Image: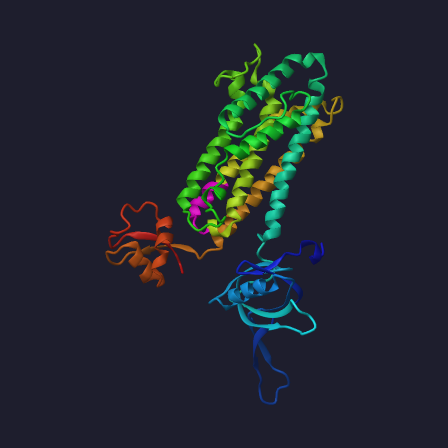
């Protein structure tokens, strides 16, 4: 793949700009040891120097002045920050050491800005950050692809069921379960609308309703804490984790709903045919499990890809989210295997190609589970190492943050890392506190 296929919009401190040219250089520091009357010398490699990144940015149009001012304000801020390189992606800690803006009389409303960045972190090579914008987009594409495959498989399964007389009892059980689920959602969810009730002829319509219900029922941990301007100015890790737990519980409820209606564990508002068993709707159970797992994975990706949100979460919080997704995906994998493994024995005589359609779902869910795990791992390891430090004298968290970091504002960070503390204003000497190493 060429770099043009994955090119990213450049930005610094989240201020975007267009780039027409980059020149990225690296050099190594060496010590040369020379000796009298000996040709040549010993060259000792002392390591790579900070990489030097040069970019030519352009601004034009009626809004060029505002956009230029926003970039200059970002460049003038103290310290390094994340630079999104159009080719190399996210570079977490880059310092702007020089910039220059050039205007020409023949080109009004147009400006060229030369930028020079120097990396602040030792040993930070190109292409090491796998979790750039392109990675997140690829993950969401995988999740959408999984849902599309699940829909295709369900459509293929339902085709003979609605046409062959011997499947009549099975068809009634499937229809009863699907209509019952949609009817329950209509009563529980404000704004939920179902377009059809003939799910035997339009099985994809049921999956569409399922996705709508999951979207309505989910407590989106990002949108629910935004203020009116759409920013994340006021939220906490505890709020996000609480919303996530609610979302996980609601997804679990949906996963078990089809079987609960058939078994009588939950009353169906539309009635279930007499003699119907869970085995009659096993394909529906598998489809719901896959769709629900995909929805939960999408919610987790939304949380773990948002830097401002991740910074409020403790490593335990991130681990909780990742583990919940992996458990739900594993449940879906086990369900699909249980339902469709017998089709391999009759693949040559089967009316459809189901036997070769379900394995790609397994592979897709495995890949999504690994991506979510890697995303969570990246969120944790992007921070300094987590250590346990000894409190040497009685204090509160603000004093402790000032003593350890020279910044009392990091008291909230210490509180997130130590939810077991009963009184943050009365911490005794000798207590062990979780804290970042720097």
Question: Is 354 positioned to the left or the right of 236 in the image?
Answer: right
Image color mode? rainbow
Is-magenta flag for residue 225? no
Nearer the observer, 326 or 149: 149
Find residue 209 and report its horizontal and vertical position in percent: 59, 28
Is-magenta flag for residue 321? yes
List the single residue furthest toward the top.
274
In this view of the protein, can residue 334 be seen by the observer? no
Find residue 343 and report its horizontal and vertical position in percent: 68, 24
Q: Residue 147, relative to residue 60: is it above or below?
A: above
- Dominant SS type (magenta): helix
In this view of the protein, can residue 126 be seen by the observer? yes
List the single residue furthest toward the bottom.
37
Question: Is 435 positioned to the left or the right of 371 in the image?
Answer: left
Q: Residue 119, relative to residue 256: is it above or below?
A: below
Question: Residue at 53% across / 25% down in the picture?
Answer: 186
Find residue 374 and report its horizontal and vertical position in percent: 54, 47
Count the labels in the image. Answer: 0
Question: Residue at 64% across / 22% down in the picture?
Answer: 199
Quadrant placement of the N terminus: bottom right
Question: Residue at 56% across / 18% down in the picture?
Answer: 278
Q: What is the magenta range?
A: 311-322
Nearer the observer, 117 or 131: 117
Q: Residue 69, relative to residue 390: is it above or below?
A: below
Nearer the observer, 346 or 92: 92
Quarter of the figure with residue 50? bottom right
Quadrant placement of the C terminus: bottom left
Q: Residue 106, relative to residue 264: is it above or below?
A: below
Find residue 197 and report its horizontal and vertical position in percent: 62, 21
Question: Residue at 59% across / 18% down in the picture?
Answer: 279
């Amino acid at each position: 793949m060429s770099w043009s296929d994955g090119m990213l919009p450049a930005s610094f401190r989240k201020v975007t700009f267009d780039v027409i040219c980059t020149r990225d250089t690296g050099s190594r520091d060496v010590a040369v040891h020379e000796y009298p009357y000996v040709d040549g010398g010993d060259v000792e490699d002392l390591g790579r120097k900070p990489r030097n990144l040069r970019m030519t940015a352009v601004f034009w149009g009626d809004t060029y002045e505002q956009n230029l001012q926003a970039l200059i304000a970002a460049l003038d801020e103290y310290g390094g920050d994340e630079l999104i390189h159009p080719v190399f992606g996210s570079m977490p800690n880059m310092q702007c050491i020089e910039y220059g803006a050039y205007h020409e009389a023949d080109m009004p409303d147009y400006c060229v800005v030369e930028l020079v960045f120097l990396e602040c972190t030792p040993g930070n090579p190109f292409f090491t950050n796998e979790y750039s914008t392109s990675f997140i987009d690829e993950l969401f594409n995988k999740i959408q692809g999984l849902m599309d495959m699940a829909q295709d498989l369900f459509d293929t399964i339902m085709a003979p069921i609605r046409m062959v007389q011997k499947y009549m009892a099975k068809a009634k059980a499937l229809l009863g379960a699907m209509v019952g689920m949609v009817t329950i959602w209509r009563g529980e969810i404000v704004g939920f609308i179902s377009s059809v009730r003939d799910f035997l002829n339009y099985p994809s319509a049921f999956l569409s309703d399922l996705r709508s219900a999951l979207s309505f029922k989910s407590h989106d941990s990002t949108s629910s804490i935004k203020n009116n301007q759409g920013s994340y100015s006021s939220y906490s890790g505890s709020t996000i984790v609480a919303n996530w737990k609610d979302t996980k519980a609601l997804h679990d409820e949906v996963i078990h709903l089809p079987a609960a209606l058939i078994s009588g564990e939950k009353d169906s508002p539309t009635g279930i045919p007499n003699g119907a068993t869970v085995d009659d709707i096993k394909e529906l159970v598998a489809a719901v499990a896959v769709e629900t797992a995909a929805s939960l994975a999408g919610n987790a990706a939304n949380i773990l890809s948002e830097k401002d949100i991740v910074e409020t979460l403790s490593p335990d919080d991130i681990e909780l989210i990742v583990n919940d997704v992996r458990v739900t995906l594993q449940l879906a994998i086990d369900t699909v295997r249980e339902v469709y493994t017998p089709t391999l024995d009759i693949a040559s005589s089967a009316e459809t190609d189901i036997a070769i359609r379900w394995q790609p779902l397994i592979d897709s869910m495995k890949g999504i589970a690994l991506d979510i795990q890697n995303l969570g791992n990246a969120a944790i390891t992007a921070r300094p190492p987590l250590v346990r430090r000894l409190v040497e004298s009685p204090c509160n968290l603000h004093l402790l943050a000032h003593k350890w970091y020279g910044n009392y504002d990091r008291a909230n960070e210490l509180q997130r890392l130590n939810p077991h503390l009963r009184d943050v204003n009365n911490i005794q000497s000798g207590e062990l506190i979780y804290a970042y190493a720097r």
